[in-house]
Image (cartoon, coloured by chain):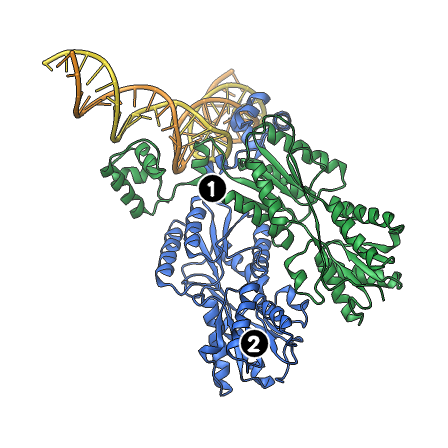
Chain colours: A green, B blue, C orange, D yellow
Amino acid sequence: MATLADVARRAGVSPATASRIINGSSKPVTDALRERVLAAVEELQYVPNAHAQLLARSHRSAIGVIVHDVSDPYFAEITRGLQRVATDNGRLVIICNSYRDPVKELEYVELLRAHQVAAIVLAGSGYHDEGFTKALDTKLRVYESTGGRVAVIGRHEHAGDAVVPDNEMGGYLIASELYALGHDRIGVIAGPKLLTTTTDRLSGMRRAAREHGHKLPARRIEYADFDRGSGAAAAAALLDAEPELTAIAALNDSMAIGALALLRTRGITVPEQMTVVGFDDMPVARDVTPALTTVRLPLADMGERAMTLALDEHRDGQGPRIEEVGAELIRRASAGPPR
Amino acid sequence: MATLADVARRAGVSPATASRIINGSSKPVTDALRERVLAAVEELQYVPNAHAQLLARSHRSAIGVIVHDVSDPYFAEITRGLQRVATDNGRLVIICNSYRDPVKELEYVELLRAHQVAAIVLAGSGYHDEGFTKALDTKLRVYESTGGRVAVIGRHEHAGDAVVPDNEMGGYLIASELYALGHDRIGVIAGPKLLTTTTDRLSGMRRAAREHGHKLPARRIEYADFDRGSGAAAAAALLDAEPELTAIAALNDSMAIGALALLRTRGITVPEQMTVVGFDDMPVARDVTPALTTVRLPLADMGERAMTLALDEHRDGQGPRIEEVGAELIRRASAGPPR
DNA sequence: TCACATTAGGTAAGCGCTTTCCTAGCCACG
DNA sequence: CGTGGCTAGGAAAGCGCTTACCTAATGTGA
């Protein structure tokens, strides 16, 4: 592997000059030397060692992002927003998938710190686990105390700059829609119990229930894993235990699609015999049949905002900045009046 | 930011000893010292500077992966396979999205080289662009000549270790199915013209056409961008230009889903009035209505194999290893006999 | 008791780069 | 022709870590 010294030697200049030419430093250099150095770079196919560069210059430039799983459309969309802003600012983004494992999340914070990132963006639900929350908080504080910046998406339990989607309102909207349609025996396919996203959305639904003079009994709530398979299983469990249900509300679209698939195998038509609604408005929500009634969160926008917070230096100690983003009900074909 | 020297000072030992303890070197160290150092690490919340480490140790460990877009289910699946093997071998994976931009692909090879990765895995279609292909090849050769390893997925135009899906056979299978059902006026929604994936799949379809005594006229082929929107547009164009079509074959599932959506808006039923087939068997292919008849490629498996090739040192100069993987026809509800 | 292994730990030389500071050469001016 | 002010380029000091090599301080055998 050719080094800068090799290039300098070949061009007959000092490493200092070579470095200046290659990096386009502001220091003026004669054209003759410039050409010789550039020629040497070409001949040797020289590429600077990124680690040596990062070690030598002290300023940190990359941004670390921790998400549950980039290939999940929910996070893919958020990531798109994050990337856009980062790229516009000439920053490299390092993405880490925690796969909803708190331990991994902790590890990744360390890893990113080790890689000297300028900022860490943490996207995804928080956990109802005090020990973990505290541990994470400590790590982030330490990181911030060494000059790192932190922004979180949707983790209101973390004090600091944050973009928080109004999950509670989303839950409220979707449940209100169901009650307005005349449903009152509603089954819920929830996400993992210890994710704050799950509990926030549920509490919004509960608020709607109260306002409409109803309840959301625990026996009509099944906890699943936010994926298609567990959604289908939960739908089956719900149907078996509560045959009189007229609507199923899944706390994300994947699970709603799982429910749809299960209903199809049982020959239950949607929305005639059963209403199904989702949450998140992933792109596929339009393409399933019937198209899903769901709640939209401006995911890419949230990503952009979070990255903007993370990049924005100026916070003159005026406390954390919290940006709330709203939820919007999307009416499609999967919800109708009860049979 | 605490450094190793800080830790050493605090523990009252030399940096060498601290380093050995922290990295679990084989050199024996007294327990008393070990405890003091570990305590100092804890107190200072010390995290080694990854760049300094990578610079100091010479052996490279991370693996670079270049894909079109991880959030595309096709690549998400491949990436899953890649990650699995990498993680099992304790390797870190750096993922780069080229968004099908050849220039970016070239840049990323440089970037990964700069980051001293041990191997580069290139996944995704090749391009019918000799200039680019040559440039890429040169860069990869240079990289290999400095000890880097390279493995490609689905780019048969690159000489070297490769995992190549049988796109031609996939095209043959899907077209044969259509002809067997009795279709002979088939419209094709192809991918970008200069991707080898597109031409490979098309040539398989042509072979099937020949065997069944038919043709695939150019006017019944619409080139799109492998995404839903362009698939819908292409379907519209096809329908307008060739109203007598009885089947539409899209060269990936996203475009097939776009076609399905368009057909729905026009009130054309599938498969009664029009057969639609896809390619890739992405997870959503099961969930759209009607469920897509398509071709399955063992994507995750391909990722695993490619990473295995990339990690496997031993290749004693016995030439490139090529692993071919088969395609499989998946029959679902979207294909039926012509009206 | 002495020479010699054997050990635990330290010293210092890098890894490949950036950047501050310095020097030598040049010009203009008096 | 001497001085000062520029300028282009080089020397060298790190950045934070690892590790080959060295040095005391032990333990061993004759």
Instruction: Tell me the crowding category of disc 1: few under 14, some 14 to 19, or many 20 or more residues within 10 angstroms, Cα based.
Output: few
- Please report the residue visible at 60 percent of the width from the left and 31 percent of the height from the top: A143
- Please report the residue visible at 32 percent of the width from the left and 32 percent of the height from the top: A16
Badges 1 and 2, same chain:
no
Q: Where is residue B144 in the image (x, y as percent from the top left)?
A: 40, 53
Q: Which quadrant holds residue B338?
A: bottom right
Label 2 near label 1: C-beta < 8 Å?
A: no
Q: Position of residue A220 (x, y in %)?
A: 86, 55
- Please report the residue visible at 43 percent of the width from the left and 36 percent of the height from the top: A52
Q: Where is residue A96 in the image (x, y as percent from the top left)?
A: 59, 46
- Under mark 1, the amino acid is Gly
Between A20 and C26, the one lying in front of the other is C26
Q: Which quadrant holds residue B326?
A: bottom right
A8 with respect to B213 (left or right): left
Q: Position of residue B156 (x, y in %)?
A: 44, 66
A42 with respect to A279 (left or right): left
- Under mark 2, the amino acid is Ile
Q: In which quarter of the image is the C terminus of chain A?
A: bottom right
In this rendering, does residue A195 appear at all?
no
Count numbered badges in the picture: 2
Q: Which chain's residue wears label 2?
A: B
B244 with respect to B58 (left or right): right
Label at residue A90 = 1
Q: How far apart are marks 1 and 2 (CA)?
A: 43 Å
- Please report the residue visible at 26 percent of the width from the left and 35 percent of the height from the top: A13
Q: In which quarter of the image is the N terminus of chain A?
A: top left
Disc 1 is placed on an element classified as loop
Between A325 and B59, the one lying in front of the other is A325
Q: Is residue A108 above or below residue B249?
A: above
A265 with respect to B12 (left or right): right
In this rendering, does residue A280 appear at all?
yes
Q: Name the residue under label 2.
A: B248
